[in-house]
Amino acid sequence: MKLIIFGSTGNVGRELVRQALDQGHVVTAFVRQPSRIRMEHRNLAVAQGDVLDPEAVRESVQGHDAVLCALGAGRKGRVRSEGTHNIVNAMKASGVRRLICQTTLGLGDSRGNLNIFWKHIMFGMLLRTAFQDHVGQEGHVMRSTLDWTIVRPGAFTDGKRTGSYRHGFPADDRSVQLKVSRADVADFMLKQLTDPTYLQRTPGLSY
């Protein structure tokens, strides 16, 4: 497939780019600073732009089969929500239907999966701004008419891709570890490109 990846210089984004290329996809990495892409591949193109610039996003999305979004917190706590809004609008304008968007475990009904520490300390205080940015991000995706899947992973680790993780568990399941490697997040996101199981759904992802 021909994919465009937003957030491609982040920790999950770099894994998405690498694994997508390994799988034979043609990849466009959308970045503000092309110098941060430190790999070369015959199937890799770099599109320079700011995700907060609607025109730059619209021009870059055209001609792709699917969009993967792994945006980081960025500046002023609004990059995920406003950037994803621009991505959704660009997809509608370009006729691109498939969107795989990474947010976080703890949003929506998955709040029931969290322990007290993550619910009240991390997302309630320390990461409150980032969490609210994800809330806005999910809202833009869910209100769209796109073929979307929102992936909600637990806390990121630096482990290798194992392909062995839990997903789509019940919202009241407190047995999940609340962590998963960035490489496994990318693995799961890419699998959604050809698997309709979670179409317009919000699977949690954790060990």
Image (tube, rainbow, N blue to C red):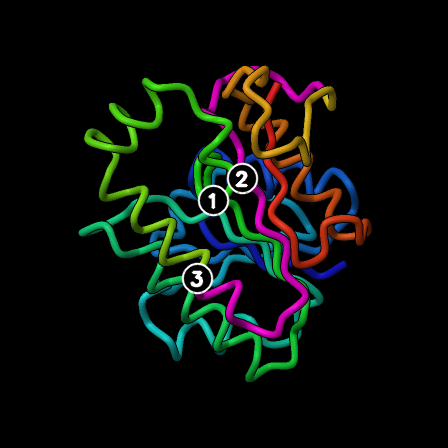
Number of other residues with Cα within 10 Å of mark 1, as a class: few under 14, some 14 to 19, many 20 or more:
many
Which residue is identified by label 2?
152
Question: Looking at the picture, which amino acid does disc 1 mark?
Answer: Thr
N-terminal label among 2 and 1 = 1
What percent of the width, then of the height, locates residue 31?
41, 55
Q: Which residues are magenta?
A: 140-162
Please identify the quadrant where the N terminus is shown.
bottom right
N-terminal label among 3 and 1 = 1
Number of other residues with Cα within 10 Å of mark 2, as a class: few under 14, some 14 to 19, many 20 or more:
many
**Residue 151 in magenta stretch:** yes
Question: Looking at the picture, which amino acid does disc 3 mark?
Answer: Gly
In whole angstroms, how far apart are the C-alphas of marks 2 and 1?
5 Å
Provide the secondary structure element on which disc 2 rests: strand
In whole angstroms, how far apart are the C-alphas of marks 3 and 1?
11 Å
What percent of the width, then of the height, locates residue 204?
59, 35
In whole angstroms, how far apart are the C-alphas of marks 2 and 3?
14 Å
Which residue is identified by label 1?
103
Between 44 and 129, the residue placed more toward the observer is 129
